[in-house]
Amino acid sequence: MRPASQLFQYARRYLGLIILTTVLIFIYIFISQGRWLLISPFIKYCEAIIGTHTLGSPSNQITGIGAEFGKKVMAVLEQWIQGNTIRQSIFNIGWIILILGILTALLNYIKDYLQGLVSLKIIIDIRNRLCAHLLTMSLRFFNDKKTGDLLSRLTNDISIIQSSVNFLFGDIIQQPLTILMAFAFMFMLDWQLTLIVLVLIPFIALPVLFLGKRIRQARKTSLAKLGDVTESMHQMFSGIRIVKSFQMEHAEIRELSKENEAFRRKSLSIVRVKALGMSLIEFIGTIIVLCVLFGAVYLIKNGRLNIPLAFNFAVFLATCLKPIRVLTSSYNALQESFGGAERIFELMNHKPDIVDAPDSIGLSDFRREISFKNLSFTYGEDSSDAVRKPALSQINLSVKYGETIAIVGPTGSGKSTLLDLLCRFYEPTEGSIEIDGLNLKKIRRSSLLKQIAIVSQETFLFNDTIRNNISYGKPEATLDEIKEASQAAYIADFIEGLPQGYETVIGERGVKLSGGERQRLAIARALLKNPRILLLDEATSALDSTSEKIVQAAINNLMKNRTTLIIAHRLSTVQHSDRIIVFEEGRIAEEGRHEELIKRGGLYSRLAGTLQSAPAD
Ligand SMILES: Nc1ncnc2c1ncn2[C@@H]1O[C@H](COP(=O)(O)OP(=O)(O)O)[C@@H](O)[C@H]1O
Ligand SMILES: [Mg+2]
């Protein structure tokens, strides 16, 4: 059972707590079951009150296995109870039951607390580890996965595992132990009646085991459906502007309720199977009680059992029927959570495809050149339905320290992909990228990314203060440094004009800011990082011409003294670069300076007409 053993891995470090809990559970069960032995002396005294019995000890008739031991235990108990009068003896029984009751309540509190503590610790461990693990994955992994589904696994699936953890470290010990203890006492009191119960018990166990498998599979599918629902909601809210502007609210809701319906159908099948199992148990439980009752009548009639013992037996039988029910529902919960655990560990066992090589080295400050050698890259090579057309093929390019390279080309020609590969978000399919003669695969990722900053068309801002957004990636930056970066990015005046200045919290994805302001914040962030290599991916293309001018000025500040690869759509930007690389369908079609390329009359000269001129001054 793989998910179970993997769960156990997480439990191992709390072994001390688990053992302590188990010991407490054992004591708890011994006391809470054992105290019911007081029933038969109690009835004996009751019989004495109404005069149907002559104070002989019912325990003399104990016939079960371990009867000798049982008689001794009972003798000790009866000695404790024995008072000067019947009334006093009954009160003694009451006292003992009360004290044991307080003790069991106390033990119950401690063991429940410890159980809850352990299962929460394990669950939180799993979630933290899973998140940390997911962050090590390359972009390829996230391209293949749906965000909503990932979120659903991290929340819904993990909380369903919690019940199995509860089961593994609580019920799996406590309930069988309670049942065993009850059986031991029953055997001691009367082995014949116990035999009846034992013969009938498998009729409960078999359906439970059989139905458990179905529950597990159904829960896995239902969680997948819940993942779809979450994904739908995620898309709906992250694309809220589009949804509203196209007035697609009704269509979205219809789509969502369709998915919710699929989830309902799957979940309801679990409810049905569980209800069926429980009803079977109720019914078979009744049959067992009936058989025991008639068996007891038969034994009493033949003088082989007395009424107090029969009554005591019935009490033990009752105490073991409840744990059987609990065990069943826990077992079902366990099966359900294995459905969830399979989905969780599926992610956990996903090996990151880009990791630091064991012999990786830190990149010292970049000072010579970046070279792309025979670089080819294909998205989704391992998924059969994805387009397998290479996004880049046979790229050979070298960028000298301090150079500004403009990359132009039609959309989809692979420009952004080239920058992603330079950041090692993806691994090249063929060929290599070298920085100062070092293969990217040999460079420690943290040291690589320290030298690079990216500003792209789509800026992501966190739902946090402006200050933290700018210092993201350099949390130790002082306020003065942040102000300086903001000034160079021409955003300082705007920030200082806000009532809370740098401490202003911006909404999710920075919705409270205009496109130009967001872009300038991103530039301030990059300035503060002070990278040697700057990657600009159409940073101004989504802006109107007024905000573009100021953003462009900020970018010019950012580009000073750096090596820059700039994907541009403005003629002026391209003209000012040291070299222009023209991309076409994943290949470098042309390379050179503006005038040369125009003269050549190739793709660039045609593209140049579509490049926009600088916004009017
Ligand atoms: N995450 C992705 N998964 C699969 N294909 C992608 C992905 N991103 C881009 N592509 C494809 O790769 C090609 C190059 O894309 P891209 O580098 O974004 O082009 P550009 O930036 O020049 O517009 C395109 O055909 C595009 O459809
Ligand atoms: Mg692009």
Image: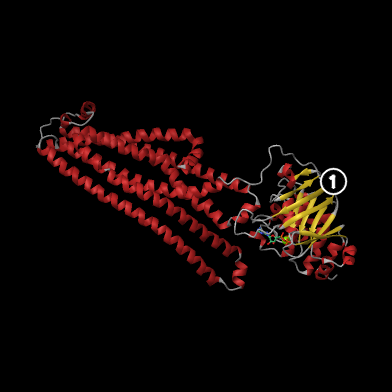
- Label 1's element? loop
Q: Is residue 398 visible?
A: yes
In this rendered view, identify the residue nearer to me: 375 or 1: 375
| Other residues around mark 1 within 10 Å, as few (<14) / some (14–19) / many (≥20) | few
Furthest residue in direction bottom, as rendered:
247
**Residue in the image at 69% along x and 63% along y:** 513
**Residue in the image at 36% along x and 53% along y:** 274
In the rendered image, the vertical position of residue 233 relative to residue 328, given as above or below: below
Rendering quarter of residue 585:
bottom right
| Residue 137, percent from left and from top | 63, 48
Is residue 436 rendered to the left or right of residue 111? right
Q: Amino acid at mark 1?
A: Arg
Quarter holding the N terminus is: top left
| Residue 171, percent from left and from top | 38, 41
Is residue 98 rendered to the left or right of residue 347? left
| Residue 158, percent from left and from top | 50, 49
In this rendered view, identify the residue nearer to me: 460 or 412: 412
Quarter holding the C terminus is: bottom right
| Residue 60, percent from left and from top | 16, 29
In the rendered image, the vertical position of residue 86 relative to residue 331, given as above or below: above
**Residue that label 1 marks:** 368
Is residue 304 rendered to the left or right of residue 156? left
Q: Is residue 507 visible?
A: no
